[in-house]
Amino acid sequence: MNALLHPTIALLQSSSLTNVVQQEIEKAILQGEYAPGSKLIEATLAQKMGVSRGPVREAFRMLEEAGLVRNEKNRGVFVRDIPIDEAVEIFDLRAAMDELVGRKLARDITPAQSKELKGLVDSMEKAVKAEDAYNYHLLNLKFHDRLVEMAGNSKLTAIYRKLIKELSLFRRLNLADGWLLPISASEHRQIIKAIASGDPDAAGKAMFAHVMDSKERTIENDLRRQERVRQREIAAAKSGKGTRAERQ
């Protein structure tokens, strides 16, 4: 007969399991397995991960606090679809934070850290040549995360990661446009050169400019996507199928 677990031990095990479930769902969202706006089914995820529905339910709560999902009463849990105005606000915050990181790294980066960053950019450029937007997106996230981590400010890193997870829901759509990849990769190469120069002003400006340029490209891309949707709806209406709103 199995001995009953002490309540504290049982709680720790449950908490650990919930964290694992939360991390796996978060990873799937950030890697694009669940697109913005898609519904997350509690029972399906529980079965997929081989756990009860309790840890999945608690993981949903944690993901909602992190800004990655929304819980709609009587409808369920959905991956957040970040609106353009919120994405712009995050870009502005990120630009200020990245400028601080660039200035810090220009003064303090080690040769080993420089080598690691160059390796990441090399991999990003290979992804560009292979027209591999998926892996480019993952490398892009890793590159910027390592820059912030190398700056050695734990509070900044925690805040940055929360913001970037939310922004990645929007950025994946941005980087899906293949023509942007070479531009993005080139800017990352310039960031490395600026940091390696040892000039805090140049490094800070390079990182600030990269984020602001990304913001402008995001706004332009969003306008293009809206126009494509509008044109499809017009074409559907002309063909007698009606718009999505008319069909509902």
Image (cartoon, rainbow, N blue to C red):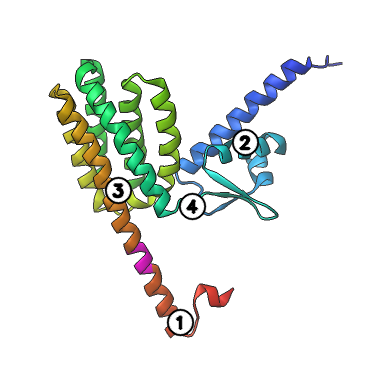
The percent coordinates of residue 72 (x first, y second) are 64, 52
Residue designated by label 2: 59
C-alpha gap between disc 1 and disc 2: 42 Å
The percent coordinates of residue 7 (x first, y second) are 78, 18
Looking at the figure, which quarter contains the C terminus?
Answer: bottom right
- Residue 237, label in figure: 1
Residue shown at the point (43%, 30%) measured from the top left: 159
Tell me where residue 198 sits by quadrant.
top left
Whether pointer 3 and pointer 2 mark residues with C-beta atoms closer than 8 Å, the reply is: no
C-alpha gap between disc 3 and disc 4: 17 Å
Q: Between residues 108 and 138, which one lies in front from this camera angle?
A: 108
- Residue 215, label in figure: 3
Rendered view: 145 above or below 238: above
Residue designated by label 4: 81
Foreground disc of the pair 3, 1:
3
Q: Helix, strand, or loop for circle 3?
A: helix
Q: How many marks?
A: 4
Q: Amino acid at mark 1?
A: Ala
Q: Amino acid at mark 3?
A: Lys
Q: Amino acid at mark 2?
A: Ala
Answer yes or no: is residue 171 visible: no
- Residue 25, label in figure: none
